[in-house]
Amino acid sequence: MTTSDTPTHDTAQVEALRERMIERLWAVNALRTQPVADAVRAIPRHVFAPEFPLEKVYDPKAVLKTKVDEDGQATSSVSATWIQTLMCERADIHSGMRVLEIGTGGYNAALISELVGPTGQVTSIDIDPEVTARARTLLAQAGYADRVNVVLGDAEHGHPDGAPFDRIIVTVAAADIPPAWTDQLVDGGRLVLPLRIRGFQRVYAFTHHTGGLLVGETGDHAGFVPMQGLGAPAPTIVPVTDAVSLTTDATPVPAPDLLPEVFAAPARDQLTGVRIGRNAYFGGLQMWLATTLPGFATLSGDADVLGEATMGVHQTPAVWTGTSLAYLLLPKVSTDPDQWEFLARGHGPDAAVLLTTLVEHVQRWDRDHRTGPGPRFLAHPDLPSDTTQVIRTRHTRFVALWDQRDTPQLDWEADPEK
Ligand SMILES: C[S@@+](CC[C@H](N)C(=O)[O-])C[C@H]1O[C@@H](n2cnc3c(N)ncnc32)[C@H](O)[C@@H]1O
């Protein structure tokens, strides 16, 4: 179906489905304030996804894939309503604000437009001309033609012509924060984005402080499509076997040629004593290991090779030192079919030391952070790297703050070099 073939729908059915969706969004805490609920109620979501059945359009969990590449991977979509409303809530958008949306679909821009009202401004930028053309057509059909400025471009540069912005909402997975986004955000402004930290994607709401320091809160789990263009992720992937690879941000990778040999060497196992229910979420543990474990990497590949206990086929937390490898598995505990226990497996001459480190990290997460909100992040191009483990990307230094009492008192105003 093309965007010009707008099907007609029974208004009462649309309203009933939309009210049900709103109820569910409140129930799961993806709606928190009345203005965001009113925005959802005001917008005909089906106009932005004419090729999908109404039930799917108004299912708050459904991602509506509108474009896929030759491998069948989505490159554009109308995101699930729950993440759209949650990100609007996290962004704390008020009447009269100027907002930049990165990644266009139409519906989310309409939501933002409702929140900023007639005195605000919404710009939505997308790298794909088919996406911008479609969004312009659908926004016009829904009555938002004059309220959203759709721009074609690579978000790496932001949108200087519309800056400064009070809010920037990124709706495509970002592995970095390019300088343009911070430069184009007012002091005190918010940048809400799905950030990929060492392979793990979470939505953070960053506040812009004086001196370009960003402080990011929350960390909602998310699964946005990858960034294209200048900000496309470029992880280092090292083959381990035909079916398994190691992804790392260490450059150069220590002894990549040795990795297959070490992986094939006999394994040592050590149980952690930390158990988890069968379908329980352990994203907090992944983020804890990714931000605190020296030499952190992820193993991905065939579950048959890594074993059925793989923690998510694509992202098994691992450590590679150049001579030894350790990683975390999650086998069933035989005495209780609903309980699983994290198990560390190691290969190579330093396997015993790596296993001890990995097990201690898992136990510390269990003791101190299992029920916590996860880390806050500091982000800045030049964060000092003396005390804390710093995650470096092309443009940014990130520091995870796991202990809320341990917040470094950064004062960029006092920096004589500023
Ligand atoms: C999930 S979709 C956007 C969803 C949309 N905000 C909505 O209303 O639900 C992500 C979009 O990001 C776009 N994108 C990817 N890389 C980009 C880049 N570097 N600059 C701008 N847009 C980009 C894709 O073309 C895609 O349309």
Image (cartoon, helix red, strand yellow):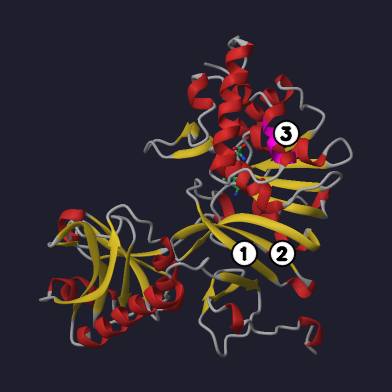
The numbered dot on residue 38 is: 3
Q: Tell me: is circle 2 under 8 Å from ligand 1.
A: no
Q: Is residue 70 left or right of residue 117?
A: left
Q: Earlier in the sequence, mark 3 or mark 1?
A: 3
Which residue type does callout 3 highlight? Answer: Asp
Circles 2 and 3 in contact, beta carbons < 8 Å:
no
x, y percentage for residue 58? 54, 27
x, y percentage for residue 258? 22, 77
> Is residue 37 covered in magenta?
yes
Which residue type does callout 1 highlight? Answer: Glu
x, y percentage for residue 118? 87, 35
Judging by the rendered image, the residue that carries numbered circle 1 is: 217
Circles 3 and 1 in contact, beta carbons < 8 Å:
no
Q: Secondary structure at mark 1?
A: strand
Q: Where on the picture, by quarter, is residue 125?
A: top right
Judging by the rendered image, the residue that carries numbered circle 2 is: 207
Q: Image height check: is 256 above or below 329? A: below
